[in-house]
Each structure stands twice: as structure tokens, then as C-alpha cells.
Amino acid sequence: MAIVTFQWSGTARSRTISFLQRPLCLRVCALVRLSTVLFIGLTGVLAGRVHAQLYPDRPIRMIVPFAPGGTVDIVARIVGVKIADITGGRVVVDNRGGAGGIVGTGVVARSPGDGYTLLMHSAAITYDPTLHDKLPYDTLNDLAPVAMIGATPNLLVVAPSFPALSVTDLIERGREKPLTFATGGFGSSSHLAVTLFSHMADVKFNHIPYKGAGPALADVVAGHVDFTLATMPGAIQQVRAGSLRALGISSLMRSPELPAVPTIAEAGLPGYEYLAWFGVFAPGTTPSALVARINALLRQAMQAPDTQTQLRQQGVEPGPLSPDQFRDKVKSEIERWAPVIIKSRMKALP
């Protein structure tokens, strides 16, 4: 309906006329405009669906926001190889370490939403909104959660020459003199795991952050730092080789991959539990149809028996989620860890 105003005798009056009462030329123009809007909208939807169906038709870059050799890097390479096998294309793992994962994450947040730049991250992505007063991206709006890959406990590890032989022993030595712990960076999963450990044990430890879990573990192996709580994929091979000694595992049940290693809860700190998880993100502008296509590829990769075997050998239990389920998990994890971080007075330097 349209309002047409006529004016006579100095008084303005109006009446309503229907579309069919308009002049023919106005009706034709209106229909042309409506058709154009519908065509553009439909074209965009169809283009997005066609793009998703053809995806991928060139190499995919999977950014890992940490140094090579760490847990996220290991998981990314296992998954990337399987996606390349499925699609017949290439997946290039690009390590962009720095600022505890913020540098690499920012690269993905600013990238085009075409599916060819993805992010493999860990639970640490949900700590950053509270740890930092200002991030160069909005975690929930500038990134699109695509799929969770799986979860893993952490291992409390020391060098073979380190004098502590148990969790209780390490806690007692920490009370006698300050011990140092290495992490993959400020706000990393290992940082939160030790922070929780420290508060529950009521012992203060000195934090030595690195640009990734790989360099952090290397210095624990060398004896430069006393201990770390590293995720299993990053530490399990060194434990098996004897270059690291595991005092405990952060899950409430022992791992079938390391059945001789007690849980931290049973070995001296009742109630302690910490699990890290890994997931894939896309730029926030990625169309939902394309996000669904990438999720389907990841699920296919995760369902492959060889992929599951490789992940479980690293201590990662596969657990794919849909994009909506993963988004809900990311949001709930941000809310869950915010009070813990605030209470612990953890805050990044400006």
C-alpha cells in the first residue's frame, strides 16, 4: 500500500491507494526493482552453495598459531594429511607463533571467508578474551567455529634427572623453594593447567613462557626449567623414549596409552582435572554452507580408522562436533574460564 497526498484549499489530506490503483509505469518499475533484489539475493545463495560443492579446488592453508613441534601442530598435521588424501589436494600447515597464539589467530580473522585459510587452535582460544583487555579480533564474531577435533589430558612431566619422583614430592619441593614451570605461552592450555594445579596445591611456581609447546618441552628435557603440564600429543613420545618422566596425568582416569602413569588426583592432589581440546575455525565471514562443507570433510577425516589410531596414539580422543555445537562449546568455555582467570589474577601485560 502507498500513501498519496493531495492538497487543496490550503489543507493537506491523504488517502491510501492499493498497488493495482497505481499508474502502470509505477507498477512496472516496482516489479523490476523487486525482481532485481530477489535475483541478487538468490544469486548470492546459489553462488555460495556452488562454491561449497566445488570446495576445495586449490590448496588449503591451515594456520597453527604456535611454533612447530607442539600439540596443536601435531594434531593439525595428522588431520591435514587425511583431508589432502580425501580431496586429492594439498593442505599446507603454516606455523604463525607469537603473543600466545594471538598473532596467527588474527591472520585468520582478517582473511577472506573462502575456506582456504583455516585455523587449528586449542582451548586456549577461550582464555584470551579474559586474559587480554583488547584483542585484535572478536573471538565469537570474527571467527567461525567449524569443528571440534578431540580432547586430551595433560601430563605433568620433569626431566629424568629432576629429584621429585611423585606429584606429592613435587608439591613439597615447591613449598621448600620456588620451582619453575614452562608453558607454550601466556594463556596457553599448559599455563591454565599449572595455574589450576598451583591454586589447588596452594603452592606458588614461577612461570617461564615460550612461543609454543615444542620449545617449552625442549627446555624441560634439558633441565633448564623444572616441570610443565604439557598436553599428551606434545609429550607422550618423549615420555616413551625416556627423555621425560611423567609424574601424573590430568584426567580423572588413567590413559590406556600410558597405563602406568597415575592421575594427578590419585597421586597427591585429589579432585584435580584438566582437559585440553582442539578445533578448527574459519574467518567469520565464511558462508554457512561452506562451513558445513568443511565440517563434513573434517568429520570424514576423523572417522577414518588410521586418523583415529594416530590421534589416540598421541593421547587425543576424537570427538567431532557440528558447527553449532562447537560454537556453543566455545561460548560456554569463555564463560567457564573467565572467573578462574580473574580469581587467579592472570592478566597479560599491555
Image (cartoon, rainbow, N blue to C red):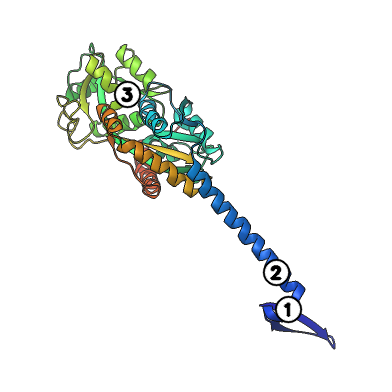
Q: Residue at x 75, y 72 (%)?
A: 26
Location of residue 208 with respect to 222 vertically, above or below: below
Q: What residue is pinned by disc 1?
A: 22
- Residue 79: quarter of image: top left
Q: Percent x, y for residue 216?
A: 36, 19
The answer, for residue 97, to whether it is visible in the render is no
Q: Earlier in the sequence, mark 3 or mark 1?
A: 1
Kindly report which numbered mark, 2 or 3, lies closer to the viewer in this rendering.
2
Q: Secondary structure at mark 3?
A: helix
Q: Nearer the viewer, mark 3 or mark 1?
A: 1
Q: Secondary structure at mark 1?
A: loop
Secondary element type, mark 2: helix
At a point 69% along the width and 82% down the height, the residue shown is 16
CB within 8 Å, label 1 to label 2: yes
Q: CA distance from mark 3 to mark 1?
A: 73 Å
Residue at the disc numbered 2: 30
Q: Is residue 79 visible?
A: yes
Q: Quadrant of residue 338?
A: top left
Mark 2 or mark 3: which comes first in sequence? Answer: 2
The residue where tag 3 is placed is 234
Q: Give residue 334's position: percent from left, percent from top.
A: 39, 43
The CA span between labels 2 and 3 is: 63 Å
- State the separation of the CA atoms marked 1 and 2: 10 Å
> In this view of the protein, which residue sits in the foreground, 220 or 280?
280
Circle on res. 69: none
Q: With 337 as the anchor, is 50 left or right in this view?
A: right
How many other residues sit within 10 Å of disc 1, few (<14), some (14-19) or many (≥20)? few
Q: Residues within 10 Å of mark 3 (few under 14, many from 20)?
A: many
- Where is residue 222 drawn, in percent x and y? 32, 11
Circle nearer the N terminus (1, 2): 1
Between 239 and 286, the one nearer to me in the picture: 286
Q: Going by the picture, which residue comes out furthest to the bottom?
A: 9
